[in-house]
Image (cartoon, rainbow, N blue to C red):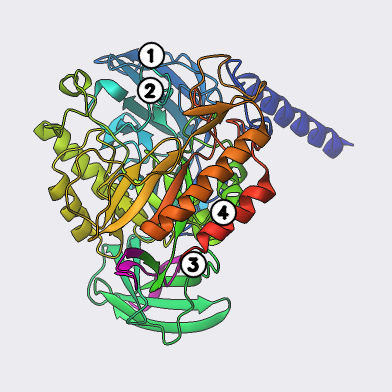
Amino acid sequence: MKNDLKKAILFFTLFAGSLSLFAQWKPTGDRIKTSWAEKIDTNNILPEYPRPIMERSDWKNLNGLWEYAITQTGNKEPATFDGKILVPFPVESSLSGVQKRLTKDNVLWYKRSFTIPSNWKNKTILLHFGAVDWKTEVFLNDILIGAHTGGYTPFTLDITPYLTAGKQQLVVKVWDPTTDGYQPAGKQSLHPEGIVYTPVSGIWQTVWLEPVSRTYISKLTAIPDIDARELSLNVATENTTKADILQVTLFDGTKVVVTGKFAAGTPISLSIPEPKLWSPESPFLYTMNVELYVNGKLSDNVTSYAAMRKISAKRDSAGIMRLQLNNKDYFQFGPLDQGWWPDGLYTAPTDEALAYDIQKTKELGFNMIRKHAKVEPARWYTHCDQLGILVWQDMPSGDHSPQWQGRQYFDGKELERSYESESNYRKEWNEIMDYLVSNPCVVIWTPFNEAWGQFKTQEIVEWTKRHDPSRMVNPASGGNFYHHVGDILDLHNYPAPEMHLYDPERVNVLGEFGGIGFAVKGHLWQADQNFSYIQFKSGKEVTDEYINYVQILKDFIKKGFSAAVYTQTTDVEGEVNGLMTYDRKVLKIDEQRVKALNEEICRALGN
């Protein structure tokens, strides 16, 4: 009986504690939400391993309820905090439970405690941040241990020297001026309307801990060469010597394809005699195991994956430059995907939600996504790798400094950035490319969108190409300064397809078209002032017009287009030109009619 009573008391205590935590959080505001928002469990937020391209078995998720405070810039850490925030949802989002705006005069503070598991004793402890927008300072046990600028890329701190006995106190300080600063902000705006949206500040991707040995693997890069039938690897390590050994094994399912041992720090090339090629039609991934041995003993072990695929361009029999995938002409067709959520803004409510838009894109017969003015969490790109979808990756536009805000960007002049602004652009774009370089789904880098912050185009494009010669570079999607540089000439035309320029020396693509609107009542971010390039009142009308536009596109493929991007996957705030509503609850078009035509278009060049 005593044991039963103890169990009952323990259960009640845990249950009451869970209710107490839940009572401290609820979605804020009265905007529409996705169905995934209803599944939020504050004790289990985005529980999936955050970095599938380099995975370890042991880790600890720090997502959940943290304390937060908003103070004036220049102020010290507040003695008392304002309340609870649900990490990793941005402070401006409904799912954060806060939904407050920051300005350049504010600082956002986060605070929580954690304990180190007892079986991590004598390990090096790494603290990972998926992404924090924008300038971050990290304090552990009252010590400033590191800082980072950049809103779209992960960063890691070794916290081992600063750990104490018992609970650890973690404080994160964030400053984010958004469009009052020079940093990349994409479609965020302090004055959202039309085609710009609610700002995103603070932690917006998973925060997590990971134990490693003193000597460990810090980064893994894989670049395929299908012509040479080789996979090149660069395995970065910490605290190794030339005597330390890496063992790499590549698998096809459970079958070993190739294995080898290499001195730490040396370039690695794996020969694959009969490679299985990755494509949207057959997204085959090799699994990979990388082990690090020190004095003959296993020091670290990570699992990963890689693919054999090639993106290139070649002139066809008619003399037209065509995009190729795996040395075959391949028409790429997909939606503009902005990756926004009505409840989480930059952050999808769940991993299931994160994968949903990709799955629906595939179901609609597309083979490509243009990731527009945003960079996603690592798991999004893994979903693309696994499902088989090509990705064109934009650099989020930025530099909304006063000298840029007051001018018309169609005046024929590129932006003259400050030294600080240009240095930051290069730093963040470099980090984005390094972050995604191993994902086979990513096939095209786009440094600029239209003329938004466009500067030194030729220099930036050539640098981008040198940094990653394995991919194509699209200088400026719809750019208004058409420099003869890079691999692609990209046109925008709304609403119907049009080819108003043609470059016989480069690949020609239609980087944006469409924008067919339909404001579906009950699924709108706002009641009125909803934007689209052309608007209808029924799904049938939208479908008919979409079919009309894509039939026009077919003729332009013959004349020279090698890819096209339809605007867009979903509605976003005041834009109602999505194939789906912003809450993902209504598909606005006839799926079967659209799918059949999309698949026909994707086969237009014989792929």
Q: Give the percent coordinates (x, y) of residue 419.
A: 9, 34
Query: Residue sitting at 82 percent across and 32 percent down?
Result: 8
Disc 4 residue crowd, few under 14, some 14–19, many 20+, Cα 10 Å: many
Report the residue marked by disc 2: 109
Report the residue marked by disc 4: 598
Disc 3 residue crowd, few under 14, some 14–19, many 20+, Cα 10 Å: many
Spatial distance from mark 1 to mark 2, Cα to Cα?
A: 11 Å
573 shown above or below 257: above
Foreground label between 4 and 1: 4
Magenta range is 294-322
At label 4, the amino acid type is Asn
Foreground label between 4 and 2: 4
What's the mark number on residue 279? Answer: 3
Foreground label between 1 and 2: 2
Question: Of helix, strand and loop, which mostly describes the magenta segment?
Answer: strand
Rendering quarter of residue 600? bottom right
At label 3, the amino acid type is Ser
Asked if residue 453 shows in the view, the reply is yes
Q: Earlier in the sequence, mark 1 or mark 3?
A: 1
Disc 4, SS: helix
Q: Earlier in the sequence, mark 4 or mark 2?
A: 2
Viewer-side residue, 364 vs 437: 364
At label 2, the amino acid type is Trp
Residue at the outermost right position: 1
Rendering quarter of residue 538? top right
Residue 304 magenta-drawn? yes
Spatial distance from mark 3 to mark 4, Cα to Cα?
A: 17 Å
At label 1, the amino acid type is Ala
Query: Residue sitting at 18 percent across and 53 percent down?
Result: 485
Q: Give the percent coordinates (x, y) of residue 501.
A: 27, 47
What's the mark number on residue 79? Answer: 1
Spatial distance from mark 1 to mark 3, Cα to Cα?
A: 55 Å
